Amino acid sequence: MNSSQASAAAPLNLAILIKLLRPRQWTKNLIAFAPILFAGRMLDGDALLHASMCVVALCLISGSVYVFNDIIDVEADRKHPTKCKRPIAANLVTVKAAIIVASLSLLASFAIAYLVRPALSLVLLAYLLLQAAYILKLKQRIILDVFCIATGFVLRALAGGAAAHVPLSAWFLLCTSLGALFLALEKRRQEIRSLGSEASSHRKVLGKYSIELLDRMEAAIVPSLITAYAFYSFQSQYGQWMMVTLPMVLYGILRYQVLSVRDNNTGSPEEVLLKDRPIQNTIILWLLACISVVYGWLPKLAASLVHTIDSWRLPI
């Protein structure tokens, strides 16, 4: 496609502009609520408001990053079976219009972040610099590319903590990092599976990976993730009751691996979250279990049941 054809994009409409920012991928930013969940501040109006505004800021800044990435990768995206449908690659939006949308989204993100807390602006700046390094250079470096993706998730969590004035434990950050690495490796796996022999022509770094190599990497990451979460739960400030959430985490990981072999959508975690009912049910159960432990409902219920059962004893 020549430059004259590329400039003759279809008339703009709001739906296309929103699609340009990839709203289906904004679910990743919900991790910013995790700090207030584990701090027991979900019912704190100010903390919830600030975390919510943080999520909005993350959605806007990540959306702008996606746009700039699509501009740079437009020719490669046109050769991809699914990415060719993105607005820029599909010639639905001109590059000039895309830059304007991305710039406005970026400015709005920093404005919201500064209103919440100046420190949040610094976290978003770190996120933006990381994404710039990834788009321009690091996404072509094996291992470093998946590390960048994982660090992006950690910065999202740090942003939520900064917005709500909640400190994050090292165990929480470790679990977030390992979980994000697992998802990043799955993303590479599915890219290789879907593109086949043309994977390296779409992106050079994909030629440096193989399914066998990714299997070996996951074999190191998954046990580490489960172990780290087990220790995090065991040493929770809310006592060992948090261990009841471990089976749900284990099931979620195993279910994701089942989908990885059976289907071809684990390269996009948001697609799994939006479409797979067992994963959705697992996340809901995990959230309910965490909330019941954090707010003491589960320990109180267990103590009440024990007391009730003890009262059933026949006098001797």
Image (spheres, helix red, strand yellow):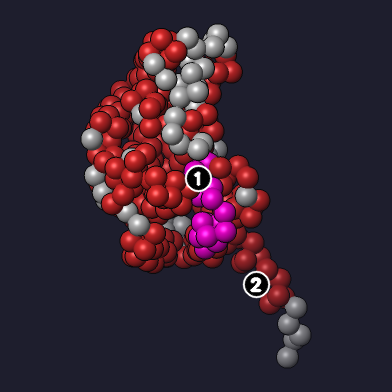
Using the rendered view, name the quadrant where residue 138 is placed. top left
Q: Quadrant of the N terminus?
A: top left
In the visual, does 251 lie left or right of 106?
right
Given contact means CB atoms under 8 Å apart, are the residues at marks 1 and 2 in contact?
no
Q: Nearer the viewer, residue 266 or 203?
A: 203
Does residue 125 appear anywhere in the picture?
yes
Query: Residue 150 location, x and y as percent?
Result: 34, 46
Residue found at x 63% / y 45%: 275
Whether residue 177 is situated above or below residue 84 in the rendered picture: below
Q: Amino acid at mark 2?
A: Val
Q: Amino acid at mark 1?
A: Pro
Secondary structure found at label 1: helix
Asked if the magenta segment contains residue 204, the reply would be no
Q: Which residues are magenta?
A: 254-270
Q: Residues within 10 Å of mark 2 (few under 14, many from 20)?
A: few
Using the rendered view, name the quadrant where residue 222 is placed. bottom left
Q: Which residue is mark 2?
A: 306
Residue found at x 47% / y 9%: 8
Which circle marks residue 103 in the picture?
A: none
Secondary structure found at label 2: helix
- Our reading of the magenta stretch's main secondary structure is helix
Q: Which residue is mark 1?
A: 269
In the visual, does 215 lie left or right of 141?
right
Residue found at x 53% / y 24%: 19
Residue found at x 73% / y 91%: 316
Mark 1 vs mark 2: which is more N-terminal? 1
- Which numbered mark, 1 or 2, is in the foreground of this view? 1
